[in-house]
């Protein structure tokens, strides 16, 4: 299961989307996420599905790889959908058995929440699949650069995000090693009651937390040894510059926002 977590990992394919300015991909991702939470009916989600499918096709990231990253959150999606399905009140009752009642409003909310989570995870994953951590850091720092005038440490926030993304595959690999080490000593994480399973998870989390703290300490010492003191006065070997394909991409994003919001709210 841990190997199925692919969000935050770069997947190089050399596609057009990989070569876009990271600011374009950040803007597209944020606007896409905002749009899917404004829809009140199904046409908006259909437009979003077409747009997302086109982006996946152009990015050349295998669909199997994307679906692999969704597997760890299936339980969360099902659990959230069930809560909305059985605990949303409404006048149009579809099924009723004693205290159990399913309404059309509950069914609609359950479907919407699953679709929103799927689009949210997939859209965010596409950005990380097509953007290296360094590019993402530069894009965030450049896009939110004006906030520096308000004494907001944009560079530090961007650096923290970059480090967090870099640590995801490292921690997953470390957790996999811990699980194999515990299993070789007779630990069983699949059988037993809920208490035994929780205690088994604790035996993984504690050494993983210790390992993460040690890695963070080593990283901090390495940054201090190199006299790191923030982004002030730093220059870029390859500063970000917009090209024609970036402006075209902004135009496509604008067209998507207009059509999707119109379809999702008024059709």
Image (cartoon, rainbow, N blue to C red):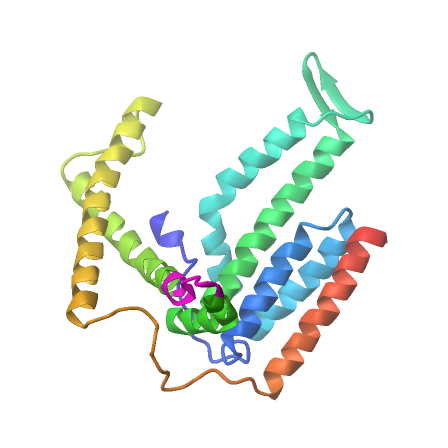
Quarter of the view holding residue 253:
bottom right
How many numbered marks, from 0 up?
0
The structure residue drawn at horizontal position 51% and vertical position 85%, both measured from the top left corner, is 241
Q: Can residue 60 be seen in this view?
A: no
* Of the pair 63 and 124, the residue shown nearer to us: 124
In the rendered image of this protein, does residue 122 appear above or below residue 143? above
In the rendered image of this protein, does residue 102 appear above or below residue 41? above
Measuring from the top left, give residue 220's x and y in whole percent.
Answer: 21, 60
* Of the pair 118 and 33, the residue shown nearer to us: 33
* Of the pair 24 and 129, the residue shown nearer to us: 24
Q: Which stretch did the figure color magenta?
A: 150-158
Q: Is residue 44 magenta?
A: no
* Of the pair 152 and 182, the residue shown nearer to us: 152
Residue placed furthest toward the top: 98
Measuring from the top left, give residue 55's x and y in whole percent.
Answer: 60, 69
Q: Is residue 157 magenta?
A: yes
The structure residue drawn at horizontal position 61% and vertical position 44%, both measured from the top left corner, is 114
Measuring from the top left, give residue 25's x and y in whole percent.
Answer: 55, 70
In the rendered image of this protein, does residue 123 appear above or below residue 136? above
Residue placed furthest toward the front: 150
In the rendered image of this protein, does residue 189 appear above or below residue 67? above
Q: Can residue 88 be seen in this view?
A: yes
Left or right: 148 as drawn, with respect to 233: right
Examine the residues drawn in magenta and state their main secondary structure: helix
Measuring from the top left, give residue 3's x and y in whole percent.
Answer: 35, 53
Quarter of the view holding residue 160:
bottom left
Residue placed furthest toward the right: 267
The structure residue drawn at horizontal position 28% and vertical position 58%, both measured from the top left corner, is 170
């Amino acid at each position: 299961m841990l190997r199925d977590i692919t969000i935050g990992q770069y997947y190089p394919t050399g596609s057009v989307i990989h070569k876009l300015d990271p600011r374009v991909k950040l803007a597209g991702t944020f606007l896409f996420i905002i749009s899917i939470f404004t829809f009140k009916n199904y046409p908006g989600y259909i437009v979003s599905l077409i747009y997302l499918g086109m982006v996946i096709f152009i990015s050349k990231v295998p669909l199997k790889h994307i679906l692999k990253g969704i597997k760890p959150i299936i339980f969360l999606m099902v659990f959230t959908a069930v809560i909305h399905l059985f605990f949303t009140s409404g006048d149009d009752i579809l099924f009723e058995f004693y205290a159990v009642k399913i309404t059309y409003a509950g069914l609609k909310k359950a479907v919407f929440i699953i679709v929103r989570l799927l689009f949210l995870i997939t859209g965010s994953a596409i950005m990380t699949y097509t953007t290296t951590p360094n590019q993402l850091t530069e894009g965030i720092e450049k896009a939110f650069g004006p906030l520096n005038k308000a004494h907001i440490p944009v560079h530090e926030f961007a650096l923290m995000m970059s480090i967090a993304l870099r640590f995801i595959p490292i921690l997953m690999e470390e957790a996999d090693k811990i699980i194999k080490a515990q299993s070789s000593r007779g630990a069983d994480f699949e059988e037993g009651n809920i208490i035994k399973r929780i205690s088994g998870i604790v035996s993984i989390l504690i050494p993983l937390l210790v390992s993460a703290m040690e890695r963070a300490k080593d990283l901090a010492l390495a940054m201090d040894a190199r006299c790191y003191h923030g982004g002030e006065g730093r220059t870029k070997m390859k500063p970000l510059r917009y090209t024609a394909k970036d402006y075209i991409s902004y135009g496509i994003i604008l067209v998507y926002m207009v059509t999707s919001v119109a379809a999702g709210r008024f059709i």
